[in-house]
Amino acid sequence: MSFSSLDLDQNLLSAVSELGYDEPTPIQLEAIPAILDHQDIMAGAQTGTGKTAAFALPILHQLSAVNYDSTPEVKRPIRALVLAPTRELAQQVHKSFVQYGANTPLRSALVYGGASINTQIEQLNSGADIVVATPGRLLDLMSRGVADLNEVQSLVFDEADRMLDMGFIDEIRKILKKVPSERQTLLFSATFDQAIFDLSKTFLNDPKLIEVDARNTTATQVEQMVYEVDADRKRELISHTIGSKNWQQVLIFTRTKQSADLLASEMTKDGIKTKAIHGDKSQGARERSLEEFRQNDIRALVATDVAARGLDIPDLKYVINHELPFNPEDYIHRIGRTGRAGNTGLAISLLSAGENYILEEIEAILDTKLPQQWLEGYEPDLTKPAPVSRKNTRTAQKRRAKERAFGKKPSRNKGNKR
Ligand code: AMP
């Protein structure tokens, strides 16, 4: 099915074609007609599925349909608001609105913390049809009287699960008090749990549920692999693999800022140009490192989960989990950085003694077992006593909550499969 059959404004179709999109992705095929039909939607879609265009295109279409005065002197009201959990995601969504709306007079403003508020005030004062914002900075601008949300018709929660994980619920409630109740609300989330359903019950009006992939499954184009290795040899294995296979662009995840910094500096000593991004780095430093990574000026980027949220690195092929995340849903987000928009990817996770329970949680939520291997020369030393594994039931509880929310009979606990 082609984009032209989606009943979108010609100016949007031409922008999409200039970007080289041949046909809509599954989420776009489902979401665009529903949004054009003025329905609220709740969509389960990871980054990489084309979800941004799935909401940006119909919003731009709706905004174009109203003939507002497009002369620069006339300030137009904010009619669409997109809330995103991180600066990086907000930047990407804004960029998408700019690209898709390139042939329209519509303007998008980007609002996020850690950057000059004065520039953002100027942008808003000169009029924006669309505002893409992280919640904290938007509230700040609202309290200064610069962001008036009285005329918002479309509200999008992007990566709603992460917004809740990051504790933005109070900010969301405050923002929603200032948005008209007569509006269209679109919620996108990579994962669903009870908190998301609670949010949807409060803020969405009889939403259409859209799921393109099975919930909580990883993109099928990503090959996943687990290497068992001693903890103190993980860095060596990573540098060896990148060097011997001549990988040029590798995204590596750690659990903490400290291990991100340490790993980046040790890999650089190994001769692999590496930088780290995490919450303690300034916004400017994070953006510079990202750009160097995108441009292949550095070979590896080490990131914590928060810093990597929403990153779009076209054609990224390799993701390595130096440490598995404690939150299994972060695993899905991490490996979703590769295998995007139809490309294939490889995600390698390093597992050392005592970490099996983390892998089990991930496997339970994916409902699959990940293949495990030993890499020659890096076999774990089995003579070392293994730390005692912690029993965990959180994943099973979450799964049952989800099943209840979807009206299914809760299944038996299969969280501890081995
Ligand atoms: P997203 O899931 O919105 O982060 O999009 C992931 C990537 O897919 C972005 O680089 C988009 O530019 C690209 N993309 C979105 N829709 C399409 C499409 N229909 N065809 C090809 N690429 C697309």
Image (spheres, rainbow, N blue to C red):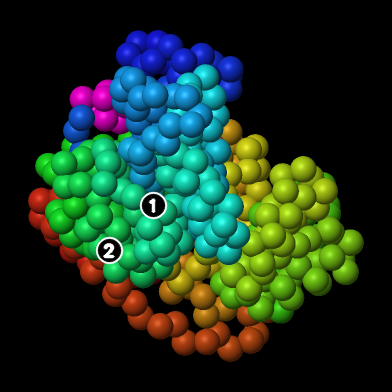
Q: Which residue is mark 1?
A: 147
Q: Is residue 21 visible?
A: no
Q: Nearer the viewer, residue 153 or 203?
A: 153
390 lies above or below 137: below
**Circle 2: residue type:** Lys
Q: Position of residue 397 (x, y in %)?
A: 23, 69
The stretch drawn in magenta includes residue 275: no
The N terminus - image quarter: top left
Q: Which disc, if any, is residue 397? A: none
Which picture quadrant has residue 183?
top left
The residue to which callout 2 is attached is 174
Q: Looking at the image, is mark 1 or mark 2 nearer the viewer?
A: 1
Left or right of residue 180, residue 82 in this image = right
Residue beneath the point at 36% across and 70% down:
167
Q: Is residue 86 visible?
A: yes
Q: Secondary structure at mark 1?
A: loop
What range of the chain is rendered magenta? 31-37
Tell which of 396 and 230 is nearer to you.
396
Q: Residue at x 62, y 67 (%)?
A: 278
Q: Quadrant of the C terminus?
A: bottom left
Q: Is residue 367 above or below residue 230?
A: above
Instruction: Give the residue displayed 66% in from the left and 76% down from the top.
Output: 259
The question of residue 35 being in magenta is answered with: yes
The amino acid at mark 1 is: Ala
